[in-house]
Amino acid sequence: MAAVCDLDAPDAASADPDGAQAWIDHNLRLNDILTVGTHNSYHLRTFPEIRAIMQRAAPERWWHLDYAHPPLVDQLEDGARGLELDVIYDPDGGRYAHPMGLTHARLPEDPAYVAAMSKPGFKVLHIQDFDFRSTVLTYVEGLTIIRDWSRAHRRHVPILITMNTNDSKSRTRGGVDGLPFTEEAYDALDAEIRSVFSPDELITPDDVRGDYPTLREAVLARGWPRLGEARGRVLLAIDEGPAHLAAYRGARQSLEGRVCFVNADEASPMAGYITLNEHADTPRIRAAVEAGFVVRTRADAETIEARSGDVTRRDAALASGAQYVWTDYRHPEPGLTDYQVRLPDGAIAVSNPVRAAGKCAGIPLE
């Protein structure tokens, strides 16, 4: 049964703030929350000269990439509790240090960028060669920023960090193709995450699975950690399709020993987290959330809602039951509309509208 925050219940704490928060932490679980995060949280607009090339090549689509986010710390301070850091594999370093878009646009290289991108390890970027600008260049850098902020704010609700694992071919002449995400590459990804976070700062599939044979069985039968246990911690999810997920899973039954959750459908033994981004997914989101899964969805995409001001998709996402709602616009974009995605009254997290419809007597969870 879904947890419902009823502060008048016989076992509930008194309505003083400390007592209410203690009751909430004990009675609600990780999947009983609703919070807002950001899509492609690292993303910066590409250089105007490269944007002009993109406009000529794709006049109907270039503006889909015309958005930017502030630094990760600023987003966390502003209340974002979901972040996306897309990664590309670079075990030897330097593979993506010289974007061909700079050459095509006749722009000089930045020595600091080249130096950072020359280090071995995963890099954070959207599309190599032309949409590569990021507030953080290496995955370890981005994770370290999140970890340090988390350590200084131990009462935050669990932060979801998602990622696409980019191994696509370059989209520009003379560019560099991504390296494949093999099981070895995913082993290296897990190792980078564990190099930054201690075990007690992570929520992993094994933490949720416990003694159950599969993650799915644990989620459906026992559920996620209580909110009090999940505060101050992060969970990570790989948002990819079957081929990538097969490589991450390897010979495992249900992500044993892995750091990240994966975008697995409801019937998979790996099921625990699901990405369901489309407005048409709303009935499936609700059913998945009611069953016990954690879902991420999107309130907007490709700058469309911010340009039109249409809040239909946003409002549906916030009411769908998805625990984490992604946006490119936690604040309105100057020059567009007043579109933004925030929870009412400045709340960072509230009780889930599907699983904890009592709203905890209006008390924010953070």
Image (cartoon, helix red, strand yellow):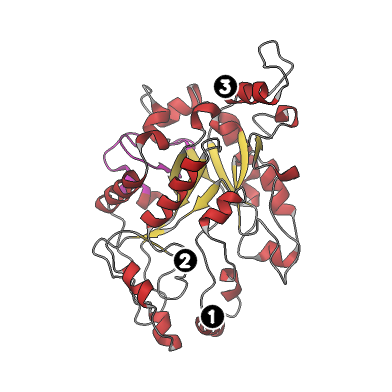
Crowding at mark 2 (Cα within 10 Å: few <14, some 14-19, many 20+): many
Q: Nearer the viewer, mark 3 or mark 1?
A: 3
In the rendered structure, which disc, 3 or 1, sits on the residue that comes first in sequence? Answer: 3
Which residues fall within the magenta stretch? 245-272
Q: Position of residue 180 (x, y in %)?
A: 30, 60
Q: Amino acid at mark 2?
A: Ser
Q: CA distance from mark 1 to mark 2?
A: 15 Å
Tags 3 and 2 in contact by the CB under 8 Å rule?
Answer: no
* Residue 26 marker: 3
Q: Nearer the viewer, residue 28 or 142?
A: 142
Residue located at (59% from left, 48% from top)? 297
Looking at the picture, does residue 308 appear above or below residue 202?
below
Q: Nearer the viewer, residue 97 or 141?
A: 141
Looking at the picture, does residue 16 appear above or below residue 145?
above
Q: Quadrant of the C terminus?
A: top right
Instruction: Tally the marks.
Output: 3
Secondary element type, mark 3: helix
* Residue 134 marker: 2
Q: Amino acid at mark 3?
A: His
* Residue matched to label 1: 51
34 left or right of 257 in image: right
Q: Position of residue 175 (x, y in %)?
A: 35, 77
